[in-house]
Amino acid sequence: MKKLLLGLLLFGFVFYTLGAQIRDQSYRLMLKGLLSHTVPEILPNQLAATSDSVVLLDTREREEYEVSHLRHARWVGYDDFDLSRVSDLPKNQKIVTYCSVGYRSEKIAEKLRAVGFTDVSNLYGGIFEWKNEGYPVFDDSGVTEKVHAFDRVWGIWLRKGEKVY
């Protein structure tokens, strides 16, 4: 009986671990096809290790930003993005753009580079990957577990936190 129980526990652990690896590989494969990779990318752990001198630009829609965002992020939007929202920044300012998974932020990063910003990166995997890696997100009250998951289709990629639609 002990061997059976031990075997079942071992099987469950292996199945759970492989499942997580398959999901991670699927996410990376999806990102590889979705993103153009036209701007430098920064990984969540690299961003977490940077100093406060980086300006974070949230390129999601306002309602997504209000649910949660990275600490000290500035909302700039996507559909109604306007360069006036970054006109106070020097062209050599270190900027990291992000959205849910990285597609919208990559497009905004391309626009920023096209008008002369020289140090612009895109957060690889977006706020979903940031949260999946265990980093905190914030709302007006402080740390929160809530993340706007865009919709139920895209929300499958968010494994940690509380999904809000």
Image (cartoon, helix red, strand yellow):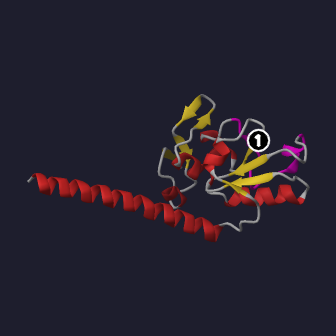
Tell me: 78 left or right of 6.
Answer: right
Please tell me which residue is depicted at 73% across the width and 50% down the height of the picture.
Answer: 97
Please tell me which residue is depicted at 63% across the width and 31% down the height of the picture.
Answer: 140
- Above or below 63: residue 144: above
Q: Position of residue 7 (x, y in %)?
A: 19, 58
Q: Outermost residue, left direction?
A: 1
**Which residue is label 1 attached to?**
54
Q: Position of residue 72 (x, y in %)?
A: 70, 35
Magenta residue span: 72-88
- SS majority, magenta: loop
Q: Which amino acid is tagged 1?
A: Val
Q: Position of residue 85 (x, y in %)?
A: 84, 44
Q: Position of residue 68 (x, y in %)?
A: 61, 40
Tell me: 78 left or right of 125.
Answer: right
How many other residues sit within 10 Å of disc 1, few (<14), some (14-19) or many (≥20)? some
Location of residue 139 by image quarter: top right
Please tell me which residue is depicted at 78% across the width and 56% down the height of the picture.
Answer: 109
Residue 86 visible in the current orientation:
yes
